[in-house]
Image (spheres, helix red, strand yellow):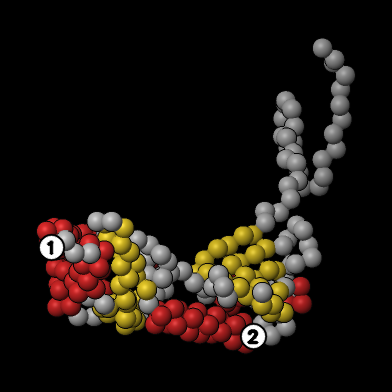
Amino acid sequence: MNNEKMNINLAPGMNEIIIREGAAPKVLDPKAPVKMEINGTIGAPVGFLKKRINAGQFEQKNCHIIVDRENISIELVVNESDEYTRGTIKGTLRFHPKFIEFGINTGKVWSPFEFSMFCKMNRAFFADKNANMTLVSACKNFTATVNNAIERSIKENGDRTDNFAQVVNSSLPESFTLSIPVFKGGDKENLEVETFAKIDGRNVAFVLMSPGAEETLETLRDTAIDKELEAIKEIAPEIAIIEI
């Protein structure tokens, strides 16, 4: 053991010193900043700007907004030229889950019985409850009606296809009205929906089409996006807005 003495001079006012044995605490390696990526509702960029615009985290001239009307989204990019501090805040207008389930204008194929059960469980989204009951009953009994018509056409030696098509046209309601939100968080919209039958032998299915729903979607989409852009211009008028 080394018995050499070590002299330590204490600063004025100090009367003791603590000596620790062992390895010095490990110093952590510096890490790059975590990039900010936020995905939320259509109002997310505006909400972010309201809270951070005066916090000194970014300058308006170093930010930009990307507007994608096709995908109904607005994306705010802050610190665009800095790889370490760049961040994105994206807001998207999302379809209401029940609107998606109906499959309007998507080519979704329904069997009559499947659709009757679906309508029965979703009566709350019909503008007229009696119309809902009529549609449920018509779809529920549709297969039996078709089979009876085919048997009758065979016995009468008639044209099975024409007979079949006649049953389709007469048994299914041509249209019905839904009262349903198109987008999450939105108000209910009255939409007229048309049924289009698809015939394949004895099997019949149909799809739901609605020109009104498409028009309503376009209007609501543009209204929602324009409202957010106006708010952004008011809060941060120097941020560049780019439509793609």
Q: What residue sits 27% from the left and 60% below the top?
A: 204
Left or right placement of residue 112 versus residue 45 in this view: left
- Where residue 242 appears, as percent x and y from the top left, is 69, 77
Q: Is residue 83 left or right of residue 156?
A: right
- The image shows residue 173 at horizontal and vertical percentages of 22, 75
Q: Residues within 10 Å of mark 1 (few under 14, many from 20)?
A: few
The amino acid type, in three-letter code, at marker 1 is Glu
Q: In this rendering, would 73 be left or right of 134?
A: right
Quarter occupied by residue 129: bottom left
The residue that disc 1 covers is 156
The residue lying toward the viewer, choosing from 47 and 72, is 72
Looking at this view, is 3 or 189 the one in front? 189
Q: Residues within 10 Å of mark 2 (few under 14, many from 20)?
A: some
Would you name the residue on which mark 2 appears? 233
- Quadrant (top left/top right/bottom left/bottom right) for the C terminus: bottom right
Looking at this view, is 114 or 50 the one in front? 114
- The x, y position of residue 9, in whole percent, is 85, 38
In the image, what residue occupies the spot 20% across and 74% down? 170
Camera sees residue 202? yes
SS at circle 2: helix
Chain-order first, disc 1 or disc 2: 1
Image coordinates of residue 95 in percent, x first then y, are 43, 69
* Quadrant in which the N terminus is drawn: top right
Query: Outermost residue, front direction?
Result: 157
Residue type at mark 2? Lys
